[in-house]
Amino acid sequence: MLPLSEAVSERLAVETFQAYIGALSLQNYEVMMTFILGLYKEGLNSIQRVPETNRNALQQLNERLVALGWGLPRYEIEDVVDGPERFVVKCFIEGNVVAIARAKSHKEGQRKCAEIALAGLPNGQS
């Protein structure tokens, strides 16, 4: 018998594992889930939960400002280059700085500023 290449060996291991999981699921779904969760539990628990973000904050801020009869926000973006959040974004409404945020991208910084600004508008959250 010829030796198996690493790729073939890996493929056989994957297919054998999949067959084992399939057999477990046919026997007892709960046993299969317990087995799978046992394999992944440590990794799943180590995942850092990211706080929920308001993906529509920019649109909501614009809508609130229009409803209030105010002008749309203006954003200034500064590239500070130190660290992973390399941009500082300032949000101006009616000429006043209402929010400042650090972010990895221009868009993320504008969204963060919009969330902060929304919280400070009359009638709070949209």
Image (tube, rainbow, N blue to C red):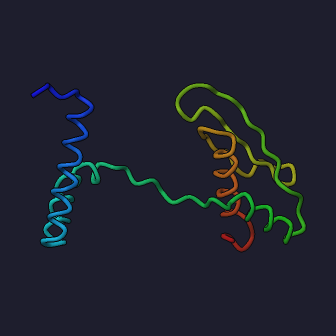
Residue 3, placed above or below residue 26:
above
- Percent of width and height locating residue 84: 53, 32
- Percent of width and height locating residue 108: 64, 46
Residue 11 position by quadrant? top left
Horizontal side, residue 99 vs residue 52: left or right: right
- Can you name the residue that lies furthest to the left here? 1
State the residue at coordinates (71%, 32%): 78
How many marks can you see?
0
Q: Nearer the viewer, residue 39 or 17?
A: 17
Residue 104 position by quadrant? top right
Picture quarter with the C terminus: bottom right
Residue 20 position by quadrant? bottom left
Horizontal side, residue 31 vs residue 72: left or right: left
State the residue at coordinates (14%, 72%): 28
- Percent of width and height locating residue 93: 82, 53
State the residue at coordinates (19%, 72%): 29
Q: Nearer the viewer, residue 14 or 102?
A: 14
Picture quarter with the N terminus: top left
Residue 92, placed above or below residue 21:
above
- Percent of width and height locating residue 16: 17, 49
- Can you name the residue that lies furthest to the front here? 1
State the residue at coordinates (66%, 63%): 119
